[in-house]
């Protein structure tokens, strides 16, 4: 007990000052994780040495020796258990170096703690001469049966791990997958919840998402404007050429249009129109701002056509009527 108090007051405080001088936080967390096991070690070691000093039968000496070794294994497992905690080694270190999500860190922390507990139980059982081979074999067969029975659930868990590690989307992103489109509201190991634009909450298994083509609209760098403008077929060629040049120049000068790709060409002769192909991108990806830019472009195109005296082609149909030698044509 005296050594325990000395360690706590002096040695551990000195070690904390020593580790605080280093740039890495790993040694600080290892020291904190081993503090409680080392404190308990002094008490266990003192009791063990006192029992060895007593004139006990050899059988009791062997028994106390096994107890001491078992407790040492438990103390070591205790230290590693705290070291693998959610708020210890597997949190900040892995989050900074591997850019891992908190939920994934929590999952791996629980897996590591389970492995540490299982190893400690196996080592202590072997210390007390228990045959653990059959137990381990039974666990293997049981694990196989469990894996077969929970195949879909495990597929969803591993799908969730893939989604969290690769991060094709995060909470708040607007995504589109086959038959579903909306905003991601929650990501768990089993499923992902998406709020559709009709405000319906859709839950999709992670195994389905992991194997699906995902379109993340929130990560667009720019938005596309792509349409064909139909001009009246009686428009003169020089007028059409002027309109093409003015529309392209308007897009080049527009602050809301990305300057990288701007295409404006007289594309084709339609059945009832001369088609001008317009292809460009907006600088913004926000839906409302995109609509404002597109509206402004449409209005400016209409102004250009009005100034040049060019009309937009309206789809029509010619109907011919014949009645007792009277022929009439009606254009619509």
Image: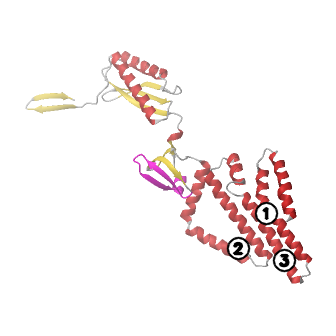
Per the image, label 3 sits on a secondary structure element best described as helix
Nearer to the camera, 298 or 195? 195
Callout 1–callout 2 Cβ contact below 8 Å: no
Disc nearer the start of the sequence (2/3): 3
According to the picture, the residue beneath numbered tag 1 turns out to be 37
According to the picture, the residue beneath numbered tag 2 turns out to be 136
Q: Residue at x 40, y 31 (%)?
A: 227
Mark-to-mark CA distance, 1 and 3: 19 Å
> Residue 306 is drawn in which quadrant?
top left
Packing grade of label 3 (10 A; few <14, some 14-19, many >=20) is some
> Residue 244 is drawn in which quadrant?
top left
What is the x, y in percent for residue 317?
24, 31
Question: Up-down: is 313 above or below 309?
Answer: below
Of circles 1 and 2, the one toward us is 1
Per the image, label 1 sits on a secondary structure element best described as helix
Mark-to-mark CA distance, 2 and 3: 27 Å
* Range of magenta residues: 189-211
- The numbered dot on residue 64 is 3
What is the x, y in percent for residue 68?
83, 72
In this picture, residue 310 sits left or right of residue 253: left
């Amino acid at each position: 007990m005296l050594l325990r108090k000395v360690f706590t007051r002096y040695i551990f405080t000195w070690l904390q000052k020593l580790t605080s001088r280093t740039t890495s936080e790993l040694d600080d967390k290892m020291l904190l994780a081993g503090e409680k096991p080392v404190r308990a070690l002094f008490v266990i070691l003192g009791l063990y040495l006192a029992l060895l000093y007593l004139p006990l039968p050899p059988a009791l000496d062997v028994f106390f020796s096994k107890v001491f070794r078992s407790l040492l294994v438990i103390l070591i497992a205790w230290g590693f258990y705290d070291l693998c905690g959610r708020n210890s080694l597997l949190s900040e270190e892995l989050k900074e170096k591997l850019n891992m999500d908190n939920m994934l860190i929590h999952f791996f922390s629980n897996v590591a703690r389970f492995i540490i507990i299982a190893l400690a139980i196996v080592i202590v059982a072997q210390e007390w001469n228990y045959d653990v081979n059959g137990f381990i074999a039974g666990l293997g067969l049981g694990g196989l049966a469990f894996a077969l029975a929970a195949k879909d659930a495990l597929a969803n868990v591993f799908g969730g791990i893939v989604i969290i590690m690769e991060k094709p989307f995060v909470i708040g992103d607007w995504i589109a997958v086959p038959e579903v489109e909306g905003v991601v509201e929650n990501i768990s190991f089993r499923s992902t919840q998406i709020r559709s634009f009709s405000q319906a909450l859709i839950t999709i298994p992670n195994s389905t998402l992991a194997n699906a083509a995902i379109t993340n609209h929130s990560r667009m760098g720019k938005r596309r404007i792509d349409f064909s403008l139909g001009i009246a077929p009686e428009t003169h060629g020089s007028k059409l050429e002027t309109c093409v040049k003015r529309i392209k120049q308007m897009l080049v000068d527009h602050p809301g249009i990305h300057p990288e790709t701007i295409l404006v060409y007289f594309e084709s002769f339609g059945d009832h129109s001369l088609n001008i192909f317009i292809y460009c991108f907006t600088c913004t990806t926000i839906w409302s701002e995109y609509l404002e830019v597109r509206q402004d472009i449409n209005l400016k195109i209409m102004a250009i056509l009005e100034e040049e005296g060019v009309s937009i082609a309206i789809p029509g149909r010619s109907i011919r009527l014949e009645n007792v030698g009277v022929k009439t044509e009606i254009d619509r």
